[in-house]
């Protein structure tokens, strides 16, 4: 928060409304000659319902104007509110008196009574009542570029895929299966100011890349580890998995609120159940070993397993696991009534008849998991669009609109 000029803080009677204060003293931008050092709020940020808090610079010119305006525009309450008139008059007299007291005897403009002066810590504390911050998260298995895909090859679908990302404009996005040249092409054509992070899981291999909007977040840290008994060793297969599997993670700061969160992107093995179970446990151990329990965390990716499996249960409901919430299940609005997120280029035709509610989305394998569960998911969408019968990938992307908790629930970094 920017430094404030020398000031005192005065809270007046809650019988003096914001409108009445403006009538008496004019608009806030005129109170200090347009210097912007005086603020007034009737919002929850100050916890003053129908009251006001004025931050008054300790400047004699303002004191003089305040008195003059109070004299020119005396407050005239309704005739049947004698008691209220007395209390309001006393409140305004106290207000002017406090300003006069704390601005007198100080030619330098400093405040002489430290008890009413609030330092930066006060304002950080009050910022806890700021509303939740809107952001969005996406997970997208983009399918590696392969000439064997024919009609669905990268050259035929890339423009649609990039356009889709630009329209949804995620704050942070995890992609799976992307190759170096694919990811570079996507990055070069994204609108806005995006950056990306991640390494190949093996030489000339696929990435679990993280893209992020630098207008909204700042990357504070990031890393990679492999899903094996030797997580720091690149390119290792383990636990009966035929493919190398890995995790890419970033720690971000929301620029608007200075709150931190961790974003983890992965792809579990498509064949080995043992690998998927051990991968889930390894990710949870790393979270526990690296960040405090209060750190907000997103884990996104292609988990290659369904909701009825032990892997999903471990991640979402097992007391021994992280007990993450899942964005599709908790969303106020779930968009895209399909039972599969991997459709194998068949799109919605892969669903057959519309599935009953009890099994709706049971076969999603692409998830957005998160903590704390107090985070509000406004909407989650399985994006099922196609162009001329062609889909941007063999997986549907998942996009969620999130309200990141207020700083009252998730404090800003010190």
Image (tube, rainbow, N blue to C red):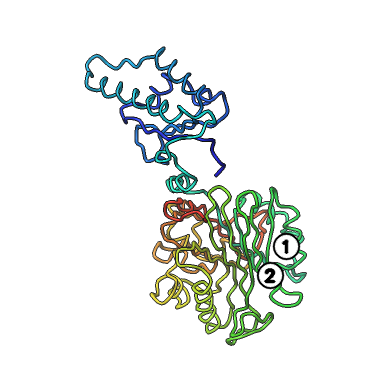
Q: Is residue 76 above or below residue 225?
A: above
Query: How many numbered marks are there?
Result: 2
In the image, residue 190 above or below residue 99: below
Query: Sequence-wise, which precedes: disc 1 or disc 2?
Result: 1
Residue beneath the point at 49% across and 69% down: 363
Q: Which residue is mark 2?
A: 207
Can you give x and y, in whole percent of width and height, for residue 344 in the image?
A: 62, 68
Q: Nearer the viewer, residue 255 or 11?
A: 11
- Residue 28: x and y in percent read 49, 26
Q: Is residue 89 left or right of residue 80?
A: right
Percent across and percent down for residue 410 are 45, 56
Say which quadrant the N terminus sits in.
top right
Residue at left 44%, top 64%?
A: 325
Q: Secondary structure at mark 2?
A: loop
Near mark 1 (Cα within 10 A), the count class, few <14, some 14-19 or many ≥20, is: some
Q: Quadrant of residue 70?
A: top left
State the image quarter where residue 151 is shown: bottom right
Query: Residue, x 63% and y 66% (percent of image)?
Result: 222
In the image, which disc is placed on residue 360?
A: none
Residue for point 68% across, 70% down: 207
Q: The residue tagged with tag 1: helix, strand or loop?
A: helix
Of residues 347 and 316, the one nearer the viewer is 316
- The correct choice, above or below, for 243 with respect to 118 in the image is below
Find residue 206 and report its horizontal and vertical position in percent.
70, 72
Horizontally, residue 211 falls left or right of residue 84, namely right
Q: Which mark is residue 183?
A: 1
Res 329 quadrant in image: bottom left
Q: Are marks 1 and 2 in contact (CB under 8 Å)?
A: yes
């Amino acid at each position: 928060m920017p430094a404030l000029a020398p000031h005192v803080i005065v809270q007046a009677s809650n019988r003096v409304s914001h409108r009445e204060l403006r009538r008496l003293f004019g608009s806030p931008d005129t109170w200090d000659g347009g210097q912007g050092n005086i603020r007034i709020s009737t919002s929850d940020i100050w916890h003053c319902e129908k009251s006001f808090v004025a931050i008054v610079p300790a400047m004699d010119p303002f004191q003089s104007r305040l008195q003059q305006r109070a004299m020119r525009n005396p407050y005239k309450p309704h005739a049947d509110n004698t008691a209220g008139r007395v209390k309001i008059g006393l409140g305004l007299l106290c207000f002017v008196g406090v300003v006069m007291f704390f601005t007198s005897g100080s030619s330098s403009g400093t405040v002489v009574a430290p008890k009413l002066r609030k330092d930066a810590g006060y304002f950080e504390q009050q910022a806890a009542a700021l509303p939740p911050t809107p952001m969005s998260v996406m997970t997208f298995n983009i399918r590696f570029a392969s000439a064997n895909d024919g009609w669905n090859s990268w050259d035929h679908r890339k423009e649609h895929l990039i356009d889709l990302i630009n329209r949804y404009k995620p704050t942070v996005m995890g992609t799976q299966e992307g190759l170096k040249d694919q990811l570079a092409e996507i990055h070069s054509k994204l609108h806005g100011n995006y950056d990306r992070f991640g390494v190949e899981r093996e030489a000339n291999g696929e990435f679990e890349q993280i893209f992020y909007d630098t207008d909204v977040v700042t990357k504070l840290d990031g890393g990679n580890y492999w899903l094996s008994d030797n997580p720091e060793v690149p390119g290792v297969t383990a636990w009966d998995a035929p493919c190398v599997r890995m995790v890419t993670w970033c720690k971000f700061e929301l620029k608007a609120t200075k709150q931190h969160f961790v974003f983890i992107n992965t792809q579990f093995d498509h064949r080995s159940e043992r690998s998927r179970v051990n991968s889930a446990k390894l990710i949870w151990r790393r979270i526990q070993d690296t960040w405090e329990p209060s750190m907000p965390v997103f884990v996104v990716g292609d988990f290659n397993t369904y909701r009825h499996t032990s892997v999903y249960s471990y991640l979402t409901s097992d007391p021994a696991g992280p007990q993450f919430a899942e964005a599709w299940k908790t969303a106020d609005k779930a968009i895209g009534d399909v039972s599969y997120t991997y459709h194998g280029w068949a799109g919605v035709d892969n669903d057959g008849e519309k599935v009953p509610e009890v099994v709706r989305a049971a076969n999603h394998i692409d998830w957005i998991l998160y903590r704390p569960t107090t985070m509000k998911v406004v909407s989650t969408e399985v994006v099922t669009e196609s162009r001329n019968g062609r889909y941007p990938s063999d997986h549907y992307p998942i996009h969620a609109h999130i309200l990141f908790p207020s700083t009252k629930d998730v404090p800003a970094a010190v």
